[in-house]
Image: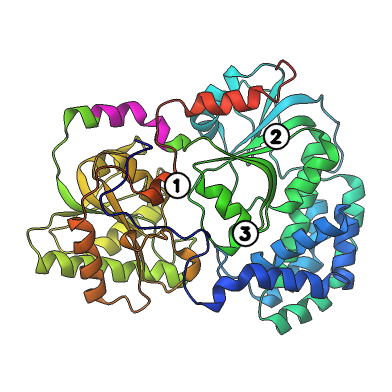
Amino acid sequence: MSGATDRMTTTLPDSARPPIDDPRLNFVEDAEQFAREHRDDAPFRYLKSFTGCGEDELAQLMAKIYCDSRPERPGREENLTASFIKLVLHPLNFLLTKRVLWRKQSMVDFDFEAIDQNHFEFWFRRIYERLPGSKRMSPSHGPSPAGWPEVEHLTSTIAPSILLKLFAAPMWALSLWRLSRRSGQNILAAYRRALSLYAVFDGHFRRYPCRHFVTSSDEQNHPSRYLAFKQSCRGRLVVLQNGERLYHPAFAFGMVDDYLAFGSYTEKLCRALKVRAARVEPVGALNLDRHFKRLEELRRSQEPVRYDILLIDQGLWPLSDLGEKIGTSFETVFRNLTALVEKHPELRAAFQLRPYGANTEVRDHVVGRARALFSPAIEILSNEGRGESYESIARSRLVLCFNSTIGYEAFFVGRGKKTLFVNCAGDPCQILSLDPRFQLYDETASYANFERAVLAALALELDVPPEVARERHIPPDGKIDQRIADFLFALSPCS
């Protein structure tokens, strides 16, 4: 497969930056300029002392703070007044909510971060069992699973010395508030988050020391986590990519030792976003690989096509973490899809829900809006989290989504499968494909452009996944667990 090409080859740009002339894409240069201009300001000299970092590391941390304050960051926006109050009360909050008195535990060779037991079983169990030496599972939230050694969650602990330092942080609230007003970005909130991340990871690594820390939390790869790790542990901070990453401020200026990535594109992206990683090792996507056997069965059975178009659910505003502009733009896509099916009744379309589990409020909100905006001809498909999305893709010709990881995974589900990434929010930082055949970027959200792009994608014939997908992902082969375990084994004292 690696030597084959799609029938209509498009040469991809050498840079991971989208080839669009938009000043919002200048955030890397703007962040570096911010660090140069403000590194001698009192709040950032305090930040250097608080984290114990060097000047070069401070510049990286300040650039991350700048990017984290950008309006494109995911999550709900926090107003400056709330941010000011939160920083003033920050030390008191940590005093009341964190464990200050604790006993240092024995060092282990590997510490795995997992959200909970289900997350651990899905992501790490097979890898964990293949590794020699001493190991620990640290929950991100909540208690340790029953039957496991008790480890308090990652944000539970703070060192007394760091808590004392934190009581000086409110002194900088006013100057950071003024800086935020001048810049038009909430530097104040991003600064507080940087302090918090350093404090809790410093507390965890002091209390639960390890040689190597393994996590799938790669959404930010925040320098605060890396600095805390390096000051208490002498091994490697190993990060597994868990979702599609793009030229976006949220992913810029991270720090890790080893980044186990979906494919070669991630290394290009890390260079463009100034992410510091000693190694970027393409190993493939665990999520897709977990369903490898089932997908092989579907390919062999030559599952008949049921849908021409499969739209992937990514939530809706206001119960969405993608922000109001993006969340509301999805409803425009719903309307355009309905109009397309009404104009072209020969096209069969479906809407694939994501697995909501017990979160029935969000699921009911999405289903309710979908039923209100879709025509009866568009089927709404349930999802219990057992691979239903992949099975639906196997039965479809074309996948539509905004920025879902499953968009690129779809190319590998079966021969000729295609994805069109649809961005009607006008956010250039949410462009997924640098190959224009697979990306609709249209802030006007016009039906005409939507129809033209979808029909062109449906007409496109692919013998193999296109270059843009092969850059993003190593094709699934059922062996990604073993590749990750082999990488980690080489770090173990038994290697």
Reading the image, the residue beneath label 3 is 273
Query: Looking at the image, is mark 3 or mark 2 nearer the viewer?
Result: 3
| In-front residue for pair 71/278 | 278
Reading the image, the residue beneath label 1 is 471
Calculate the distance from the C-alpha at mark 3 to the C-alpha at mark 2. Answer: 23 Å
| In-front residue for pair 423/23 | 23
* Residue 83 in view in this figure: no
Magenta segment range? 288-297
Query: Looking at the image, is mark 3 or mark 1 nearer the viewer?
Result: 1
Left/right placement of residue 118 relative to residue 69 reads left
Could you tell me the amino acid type at mark 1?
Glu
Q: Is tag 3's residue or tag 2's residue first in the polypeptide sequence?
A: 2
Left/right placement of residue 426 relative to residue 414 reads right
* Residue 128 in view in this figure: yes
Q: Residue at x 84, y 69 (%)?
A: 39
In which quadrant is the N terminus drawn? top left
Could you tell me the amino acid type at mark 2?
Phe
